[in-house]
Image (cartoon, rainbow, N blue to C red):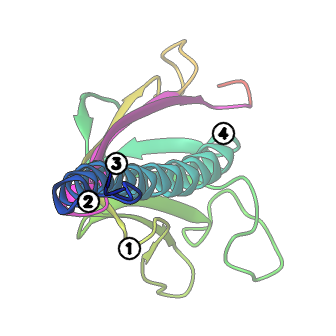
């Protein structure tokens, strides 16, 4: 008897095409997942940067404001409906002349919002305001709510600061709403 032995090792063309197709689908799904993870990482990094920068700016403001006195919101005293500018006298020499005088107009500090940035101005020899937040942070609204600014009102001066804005752009945009309250350290007389 003559029998022909066929060698059945290897894959047919159809088997190779099916396995390559399955591999391609799996790789496309995996690549999409990797891109999603990278995008989420960018957004998380953006939010962390914002929170760090805003935390530093707010803590710096609060530290300065806490030791100040004679607070004025939008050029007047209390502003329970919210003001855009806060000016107060610093309880230290901020103009660098080597002396502190509570009546010195140069020993004042002002905070306001300008061009989407939180600005700080120290009244010393005609100085201008400087931004204290990073360029990546866009502040849409900032309000100061001041109560107890009058010396004889029996209330300790207190300022509530609210800030709304965003960081990043388009796909990595992270919105934020932050508020903090600062009260004057020294007893109001």
Q: Can you tell which mark lies on residue 3? A: none
Q: CA distance from mark 4 to mark 3?
A: 48 Å
Give the magenta-colored segment's residue range: 158-185
Q: Residues within 10 Å of mark 1 (few under 14, many from 20)?
A: few
Q: CA distance from mark 2 to mark 3?
A: 26 Å
Front residue of 20/9: it is 9
Q: CA distance from mark 1 to mark 4?
A: 26 Å
Left or right, 46 with reference to 20: right
Q: Quadrant of the C terminus?
A: top right
Q: Can you tell which mark lies on residue 33? A: 3
Residue 142 appears at what percent x and percent y? 29, 46
Relative to 81, is 83 above or below? below
Q: Residues within 10 Å of mark 2 (few under 14, many from 20)?
A: few
Relative to 94, is 68 above or below? above
| Residue occupied by mark 2 | 16
- Disc on the earlier residue, 2 or 3: 2
Looking at the rendered image, the disc whose residue lies closer to the viewer, 4 or 2, is: 2
- Disc on the earlier residue, 1 or 4: 4
Residue 23 appears at what percent x and percent y? 31, 54
Residue 39 appears at what percent x and percent y? 35, 56
Looking at the rendered image, the disc whose residue lies closer to the viewer, 4 or 3, is: 3
Q: Can you tell which mark lies on residue 135? A: 1
Looking at the rendered image, the disc whose residue lies closer to the viewer, 1 or 4, is: 1
Picture quadrant where residue 187 is located: top right
Q: Residue at x 42, y 31 (%)?
A: 179
Residue 36 appears at what percent x and percent y? 32, 50
- Disc on the earlier residue, 3 or 1: 3
Front residue of 121/173: it is 173
| Residue occupied by mark 4 | 66
Residue 28 on the magenta span: no
Left or right, 121 with reference to 85: right
Q: CA distance from mark 4 to mark 2?
A: 74 Å
């Amino acid at each position: 008897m003559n029998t022909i032995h066929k060698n059945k090792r290897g894959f047919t063309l159809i088997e190779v095409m099916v396995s390559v197709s399955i591999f391609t689908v799996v790789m496309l799904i995996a690549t999409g997942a990797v891109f999603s993870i990278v995008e989420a990482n960018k957004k998380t990094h953006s939010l962390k940067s914002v929170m760090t920068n805003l935390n530093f700016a707010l803590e710096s403001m609060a530290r300065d404001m806490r030791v100040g006195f004679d607070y004025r919101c939008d050029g007047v005293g209390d502003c329970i409906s919210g003001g855009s500018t806060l000016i107060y006298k610093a309880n230290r020499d901020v103009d660098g002349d080597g002396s502190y005088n509570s009546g010195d107009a140069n020993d004042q500090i002002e905070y306001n919002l300008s061009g989407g940035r939180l600005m700080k101005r120290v009244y010393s020899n005609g100085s201008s305001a400087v931004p204290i937040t990073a360029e990546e942070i866009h502040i849409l609204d900032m309000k100061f709510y001041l109560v107890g600014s009058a010396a004889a009102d029996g209330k300790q001066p207190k300022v509530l600061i609210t800030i709304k804005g965003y960081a990043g752009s388009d796909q990595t945009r992270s919105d934020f709403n932050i508020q903090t309250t600062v009260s004057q350290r020294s007893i109001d007389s």
